[in-house]
Amino acid sequence: GNSVTQMEGPVTLSEEAFLTINCTYTATGYPSLFWYVQYPGEGLQLLLKATKADDKGSNKGFEATYRKETTSFHLEKGSVQVSDSAVYFCALLYSGAGSYQLTFGKGTKLSVIP
Amino acid sequence: DGGITQSPKYLFRKEGQNVTLSCEQNLNHDAMYWYRQDPGQGLRLIYYSQIVNDFQKGDIAEGYSVSREKKESFPLTVTSAQKNPTAFYLCASAPGTSVYNEQFFGPGTRLTVL
């Protein structure tokens, strides 16, 4: 079946540090890949997405590249800020038997300290 | 403003009572979804609907029921048959059924069963 594996947190970084959150996936066919962010007590917001191999999604300084050869979609940011503290979810969207379902990783909690 | 609203934000119920969570969207989206989020876990799909008057079970549908009588509304009922209903519930919608369509999330309802 389809699955998403994220690095376990929590991750604690100092402000302006480099961030990488690893995400690998297992899927049949050609899924789309997403990173969502969840701030405390809120719903999820789409951070970025990529719909085919070698696509790079980017938003708010975050980037992730859809690597089919390594089945990965790692999230990176060159310089994190305190306001980036949140839980980050990697997800894949696939189609099968006429349904379109998101499969989520377990989430990685990021804390950025001044 | 276009978006997804969930009400109430916090809900308390006694054990054995049914409770209905509201989800409304004015984005004119065809597809709607209900997820459950537990601490340290990713989101798990409860039910989804791709069109009015039609819905399908997700991965953890037991103890839940839904209806889709209107395009903009997708209420979720947590029944007394749900063994562990205390969780954070998230509703989402998408423009259509395509792997290119990201899902948009509401702010969530935190249900606590006493």
Image (cartoon, coloured by chain):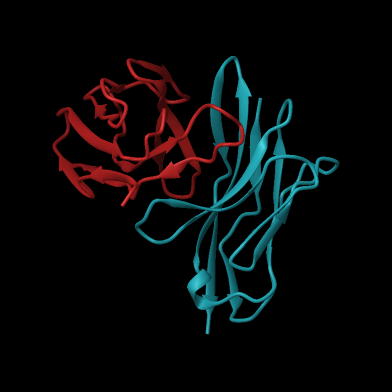
Q: Residue at x 52, y 85 (%)?
A: A114
Letter of the chain in cyan = A
Relative to residue B27, is residue A114 drawn left or right?
A: right
Q: Residue at x 30, y 22 (%)?
A: B68
Task: Where is residue A85? Give x, y as percent.
Answer: 50, 69
Rendered view: B38 above or below B69: below
> Which of the 4 image quadrants contains residue A31?
top right
The residue closer to the viewer here, A31 or A112, is A31
The residue closer to the viewer here, A11 or B105, is B105
The residue closer to the viewer here, A78 or A105, is A78
> Which of the 4 image quadrants contains residue B38?
top left
Task: Where is residue B31? Give x, y as percent.
Answer: 43, 28
Quarter the C terminus of chain B occupies: top left
Task: Where is residue A67? Give x, y as percent.
Answer: 80, 46
Q: Colour of chain B?
A: red
- Number of marks in the image? 0
Q: Residue at x 34, y 47 (%)?
A: B3
- Residue farthest to the right, as pictured: A69
The residue closer to the viewer here, B75 or B53, is B53
Q: Residue at x 27, y 31 (%)?
A: B73
Task: Where is residue B104? Give x, y as percent.
Answer: 44, 44
Relative to residue A58, is residue A86 drawn left or right?
A: left
- Residue farthest to the bottom, as pictured: A114
